[in-house]
Image (cartoon, rainbow, N blue to C red):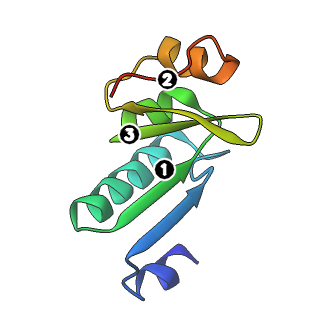
Amino acid sequence: MLARWLALDPLILLFDEPTRGIDVGAKSAIHDLVRRLARAGAAVLMISSELPELLGMSDRLLVMRDGRVAGELPAGATEEDVLALAVGTVREAAA
């Protein structure tokens, strides 16, 4: 199914839990594909409940709390940075 959508050469891609329930080898292949798409100029939005995955894959992170964006973090942010925004102990992230 993914191959069919990619054949359309999309400019924007939304991945919601792209590696949930798959083995480590397939996860690595999906991460490589997402990186290649981004390098080729596609806008990629990834939603994942796996924080280490997001930290390793993102150029920037938008953290949501109570249905709103709580803050934005740059690449290289830590789990602590994300959690501080998620629980509301930090008003705004340094970019």
At which x and y percent is residue 30?
44, 54
Marker count (numbered): 3
At which x and y percent is residue 20?
65, 45
Q: What number is the disc on residue 60?
A: 3
Q: Identify the image quadrant of residue 73.
A: top left
Residue at 43 percent across and 79 percent down: it is: 6
Residue at 45 percent across and 37 percent down: it is: 61
Q: CA distance from mark 1 to mark 3?
A: 24 Å
Check the image and name the residue furthest to the bottom.
8
Quarter containing the N terminus:
bottom right
**Sequence-first tag of 2 and 3:** 3
Quarter containing the C terminus:
top left
Instruction: Tell me the element at label 1.
Output: helix
At which x and y percent is residue 2?
53, 74
Residue at 48 percent across and 56 percent down: it is: 45
Q: Please name the amino acid that badge 3 sits on.
A: Arg
Residue indicated by mark 1: 26
**Sequence-first tag of 1 and 3:** 1
Q: What number is the disc on residue 38?
A: none
How many neighbours does mark 1 have within 10 angstroms: few (below 14), some (14-19), or many (20 or more)? few
At which x and y percent is residue 49?
65, 36
Tell me the mark number nearer the camera, choosing from 1 and 3. Answer: 3
Q: Please name the amino acid that badge 1 sits on.
A: Ala
Residue indicated by mark 2: 92
Query: Is 58 left, or right, of 51 in this rendering?
Result: left
